[in-house]
Image (cartoon, helix red, strand yellow):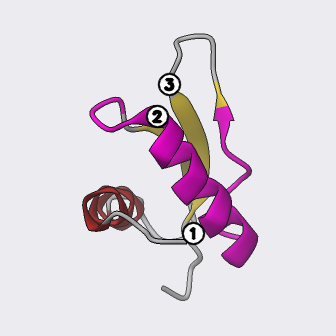
């Protein structure tokens, strides 16, 4: 799978904005939602303890819960 660097940067920024040992739900409406969904599904498979399984919500955006481990 070829990952879009722009989307990966946005996901990394979201992860960096979370305090260690906490979790937060995110959506990134500024990017193509189908592409975002495929990226987040890949990251969920690779890092299931950090990225929940992404899903579309009623607002039409992809939402995912990101958990930042304490040891990061």
Q: Would you say 54 lies left or right of 10 here?
A: right
- Marks 2/3 in contact by CB < 8 Å: the verdict is yes
**Which residue matches tag 3?**
61
* Marks 3 and 1, the one that precedes in the sequence: 1
Query: Number of numbered discs present?
Result: 3
Residue at image x 74%, y 50%?
53
Of tags 3 and 1, the one toward the viewer is 3
Residue farthest along the top direction in this orientation: 58
**Which residue matches tag 1?**
21
Q: Would you say 49 lies left or right of 3 here?
A: right
Q: Which mark is drawn over residue 64?
A: none
Residue farthest along the bottom direction in this orientation: 71
Residue at image x 66%, y 56%?
41
Q: Which mark is drawn over residue 33?
A: 2
Residue range in magenta is: 29-55
On the image, which quarter does residue 49 sit in?
A: bottom right
Label 2: element kind: helix
Q: Would you say 11 lies left or right of 49 here?
A: left
């Amino acid at each position: 799978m070829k990952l879009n660097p722009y989307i990966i940067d946005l996901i990394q920024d979201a992860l960096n904005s979370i305090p260690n040992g906490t979790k937060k739900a995110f959506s990134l409406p500024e990017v193509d939602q189908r592409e975002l969904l495929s990226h987040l599904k890949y990251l969920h498979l690779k890092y299931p303890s950090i990225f929940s399984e992404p899903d579309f919500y009623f607002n039409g955006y992809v939402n995912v819960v990101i958990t930042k481990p304490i040891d990061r």
